[in-house]
């Protein structure tokens, strides 16, 4: 299956270019400014009013010219898109700080003028993340496929392995709903699992993440306490969501509660509506976790009805969950071979879409179809168009079903396993907040779903959802309205 990665509309490319031009002449971005995306427009509500582009988030605090904004653009739901990256590369001939070889190239030390050396960033918006494997991990790891020659390097002092993985920049918005910081949770220094400690711990974790970002991505020193507080306070004030649909107009009309303003008042607490039964209030899990468009179910407008119908599919369509590390191998669940769930089993946070407690999972988006035996995983992966990335062979992990044998994993991203060195964490990563999806394609941490059609087709086959053509159409309409 082929896909042209520069297929977003001309109006969106113009919007990206116009934002760059506006940034050059103004020190602020108007609050709730609409930014066009392929299906409508996204917007961000900032509790501090218009976005002040003189704050530390927009300042170069390192040595290579990067700012937080470099990888977190307001017009792209505070992430970046391949179209934006390609336009920037052409305009600057690779000289923009985004392409700094520390992680903006496939390998360190690449010539900025070498397009091929920046192929993953240009085609999928992927940043190279170098993770140092802990001492004495439970498993061994080797590169079975190393297309760029830097999959595994070694720390010259400790001789620890440094593993290259390639991931999409996570949005720096809607952060108050997080239960883990970063895809693999590596910046969750203080747990985000208790309502009483959440404000202080989230502030502490985001401060630690900002330090890491400046030191690693911007190649700088530790920012001042005032700069760090400025960054974190700015990020915590942001709420981003789709605000308009090309077909129906504003997503908060006629009783609907889409858009960033309603999201900014959405209450939440750690464990709220937890699908595994750990809501501290004692309330049982309600699979109807998203209720933005209930009022449109009987609308006279066909497109509004489709969005509402897609919300019902999201909440109720049965997914047969098998071979998901973190669920099917979870001893607290008695390691069930199969779980009858819905999309909200893993996306249980009301009207937000992530998990309200840490639940890193391996749904197989980093696995290799040629190495798989589960036909549902193979069928799902065949719907995706993953980039050419290193593939790691991981050995030495005991097989819970057969203690006399060990498991072998083939993956392009060992996930949390690289952080802990534990077999149980191999391949696992957090589920992301779903708001603002239409403005930040491609999808999954590795950009392997070019669009929401590929994403839905993956889930439909991976979890045997048996969705009809109309159900898939409605589900995509709903996801584009988040």
Image (spheres, rainbow, N blue to C red):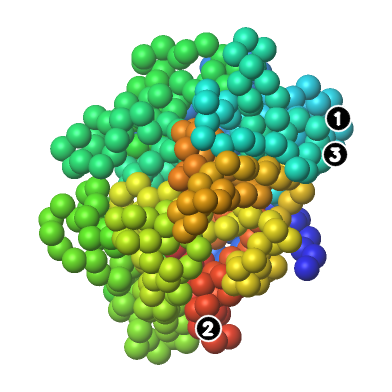
Residue 466 is labelled as 2
Task: Tell me the distance, in whole angstroms, between the alpha carbons under discs 2 and 1.
Answer: 47 Å
Q: Is residue 384 above or below residue 265?
A: below
Residue found at x 49% / y 23%: 212
Residue 113 is labelled as 1
Q: Quadrant of residue 313?
A: bottom left
Per the image, label 3 sits on a secondary structure element best described as helix
**Nearest the eye: 251 or 2:** 2
Per the image, label 2 sits on a secondary structure element best described as loop
Per the image, label 1 sits on a secondary structure element best described as loop
**Nearest the eye: 430 or 135:** 135
Q: With 450 as the anchor, is 28 left or right in this view? A: left
Quick check: marks 3 and 1 in contact, CB under 8 Å?
A: no
Q: Position of residue 469 (x, y in %)?
A: 58, 85
Residue found at x 60% / y 57%: 365
Q: Is residue 466 above or below residue 3?
A: below
Residue 391 seen: yes
Quick check: marks 2 and 3 in contact, CB under 8 Å?
A: no
Q: Sequence-wise, which precedes: disc 2 or disc 3?
A: 3
């Amino acid at each position: 299956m082929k896909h042209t990665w520069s297929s977003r509309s001309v109006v969106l490319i113009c919007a990206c270019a116009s934002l760059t031009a506006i940034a050059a002449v103004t020190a602020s971005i108007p609050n709730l400014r609409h930014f066009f995306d392929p299906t409508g427009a996204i917007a961000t509500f900032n509790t501090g009013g218009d976005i002040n582009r003189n704050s530390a988030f927009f300042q170069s605090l390192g040595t290579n010219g990067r700012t937080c904004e470099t990888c977190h653009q307001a017009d792209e739901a505070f992430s970046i898109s391949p179209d934006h990256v390609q336009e920037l590369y052409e305009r600057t001939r690779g000289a923009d700080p985004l392409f700094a070889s520390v992680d903006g190239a496939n390998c360190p030390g690449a010539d900025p003028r070498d397009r091929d050396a920046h192929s993953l960033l240009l085609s999928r918006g992927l940043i190279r993340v170098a993770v140092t494997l802990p001492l004495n991990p439970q498993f061994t790891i080797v590169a079975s496929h190393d297309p760029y020659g830097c999959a595994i390097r070694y720390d010259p002092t400790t001789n620890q392995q440094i593993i290259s993985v390639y991931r999409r920049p996570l949005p720096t918005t809607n952060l108050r709903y997080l239960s883990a910081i970063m895809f693999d949770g590596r910046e969750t220094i203080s747990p985000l699992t208790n309502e009483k400690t959440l404000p202080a711990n989230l502030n502490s974790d985001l401060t630690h993440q900002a330090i890491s970002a400046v030191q690693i991505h911007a190649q700088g020193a530790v920012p001042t306490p005032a700069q760090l507080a400025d960054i974190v306070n700015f990020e915590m004030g942001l709420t981003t969501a789709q605000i308009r649909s090309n077909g129906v107009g504003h997503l908060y009309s006629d009783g609907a509660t889409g858009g960033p303003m309603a999201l900014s008042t959405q209450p939440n607490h750690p464990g709220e509506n937890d699908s595994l039964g750990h809501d501290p209030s004692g309330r049982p899990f309600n699979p109807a976790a998203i209720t933005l468009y209930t009022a449109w179910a009987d609308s006279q407008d066909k497109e509004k009805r489709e969005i509402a119908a897609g919300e019902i599919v999201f909440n109720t369509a049965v997914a047969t969950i098998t071979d998901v590390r973190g669920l099917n191998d979870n001893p607290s669940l008695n390691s069930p071979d199969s779980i009858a769930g819905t999309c909200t089993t893993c996306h249980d946070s009301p009207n937000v879409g992530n998990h309200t407690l840490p639940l890193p999972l391996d749904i197989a988006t980093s696995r290799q179809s040629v190495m798989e035996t589960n036909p549902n995983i193979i069928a799902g992966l065949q719907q995706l168009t993953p980039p050419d990335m290193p593939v790691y062979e991981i050995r030495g992990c005991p097989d819970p079903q057969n203690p006399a044998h060990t498991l072998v994993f083939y993956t392009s991203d060992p996930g949390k396993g690289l952080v802990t060195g534990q077999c149980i964490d191999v391949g696992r990563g957090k589920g992301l907040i779903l708001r603002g999806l239409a403005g930040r394609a491609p999808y999954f941490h590795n950009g392997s779903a070019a669009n929401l059609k590929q994403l839905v087709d993956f889930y439909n086959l991976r979890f045997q959802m048996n969705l009809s053509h109309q159900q898939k159409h409605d589900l995509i309409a709903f996801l584009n309205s988040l």
